Image: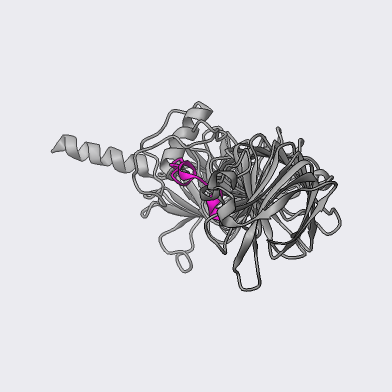
Amino acid sequence: MAQNTSAAKDTVNSRQINIVYGANFTKDEAQFPGASIFSKDDERQVQFEHQGADLWCDIAIFYSGENRLKAIGNVRLQQGDSIEMNSGKLDYDGNTKLARAWEKVDLSDGQMTLTTDTLYFDREAQLSYYRSGGRVVDSVNVLTSRLGNYFIELKKVQFRDSVHIDNPEYIIDSEQLDYYRISKNAYMYGPSTITGEDYKIYCERGFYDTKIEQGYGVKNTKINYNNRIIEGDSVYFDKTTSFASATNNIKVTDTINQGVVRAHYAEVFKEKDSVFATKRAVAISVNEQDRDSLYIHGDTLMVTGKPESRIIRAFSNAKFYKTDLSGKCDSIHSEEKTGLTQLITDPIMWNVDNQMTGDSIHLISDKETEQLDSLKVINNSFVIAFDTIGKTGYNQAKGKDLFGKFIDNELKIIDLVKNTEVIYYVYNDDDELIGINKTICSKIRLLMENSDIEDITFFVNPDGNIFPEKDLPVESRKLKGFVWRGDERIMTKDDIFDEDDNNIELVKIRGIDDPIGIDAEEQERSGQIPNSNIINPNSKAIKPKRPVQKKVTSEQ
């Protein structure tokens, strides 16, 4: 019993606030019953000590029985070699080790200074916090918010409500942000905006390295980057390399040309003015005249060049679609400056019901109106259309080259030149078959109306005839090289994607870990030993996981 009593006394004594220097002593039982009043003398201030912390002030009202005091005038609280808090007034409870300071408060650890009008310092939890607005200044940033918690051992500041970071290179505004002083890393947990000299980032959950302006967002992220807007489930950004990448449900908008790239993985290189996209990638160009969009797809897409000289390249399994025109080939090359779109290697194109093939196909747009102007099919040009009246044969025309003319975005004239041949089913006004026209000549002109052949003109020594159906054998009703590929026709914008595109398994976005997990990661990064006793009042105990803080790559 004696030993227990002695231990209890030692515990009480260790919690007791100790007077180091009392200077002038008085009492005022009327105003401060039970309190001892100490005031400074000409040599020094009043000084107290409590469990590793020292306190100086001009006047102290000390309630020794309750183990608490009120400090007034030029108050300074120092803990160890680094933590110092100054204020006009301070209340301190030795039992709870909780201090409340007010009137021009500042707290410093030698590398950072926090200022506010009222600051609470919980020495037991090593946590200081404010609830009425505060300002933190370190070697890199100036940070302000309405609510804030500073975890001293973690060297971490939690900012809540109207968070603002001011840096010569950028500004951050957020509703909720955790800032680690050693690494200068910021983690954002609410609607946040980062504004730099030539970029603006919005996200609702993200990470940002304030030293090198590098980070990523994983919820509703949008980057306004030069003349492009980048959106995606996960977006990475690096100012030093002028690089951004995005993963899953990506949209890259060209704010000048109003073009859009959609994909599940994309990279943007600002200095090269280029976009690389893959995984169900599609480039969408909108015509301002008729609002008819052109969709270009390939296994890989590249959009390069300045706005006035944009080039779109689609590689491997390339396809395109617009309302009256569609096609596919191995690769597509489309250039803004010249208005030329090339279908390269085994191209096929459909103008409504008309199938066109050749060694290569060129579409030329009017640079002023952005509407289609002309068409070229180079070498082995072949046009086929199913006979929609008789529903048994095919209208056909072939030649070495084909030249077409668009009027108001509709193909109106088709010229076939050199070694031309035609097979055409001729009907009267009652849709009764007159015969089958089979002719060869040097040049053929087809006049189109509503994508049907309205008139045919033969130039230079045409040789042929209109044969009654019974006089022309079935095997003679197809020109050499005839291949009908109607089942491959692209009927809608969704048809540009094949089964593999539609069954892509999206990368799982790791996201930002719970703050406790991030605390452990940041302690490892700064060389600190993780402290399992640190309490985060805003977090639940979740097993720590390492947060993703690296550039997303196509291998992931």
> Residue 533 at x, y = what percent?
36, 38
Q: Is residue 60 visible?
A: no
Magenta stretch: includes residue 501: yes
In percent of width and height, residue 332 lies at 68, 40
Q: Nearer the viewer, residue 244 or 191?
A: 244
User: Where does the image place residue 379, in percent across and percent down from the top left?
Assistant: 74, 36
Report the residue that reaches farthest toward the bottom: 430
Q: Which residue appears at 53% of the width and 35% of the height? A: 549
**Residue 450 appears in view:** yes
Horizontal relation, residue 399 to residue 74: left or right: right
* In the image, residue 473 lies in the stretch drawn in magenta: no
Image quarter in which the N terminus is found: top left
The residue closer to the viewer here, 379 or 409, is 379
Q: How many marks?
A: 0
Left or right: residue 78 compared with residue 465: left
Q: Is residue 55 left or right of residue 380?
A: left
Colour scheme shown: one colour
Q: Residue at x 70, y 49 (%)?
A: 422
Q: Is residue 34 above or below residue 525?
A: below
Q: Residue 348 at what x, y percent from top left?
A: 63, 43
Q: Nearer the viewer, residue 34 or 425?
A: 425
Q: Which residue lies most toward the top here?
A: 527
Residue 325 placement: quadrant: bottom right
Nearer-the-camera pick, 280 or 345: 345
Q: Which residues are magenta?
A: 492-508
Residue situated furthest left in the rendering: 1
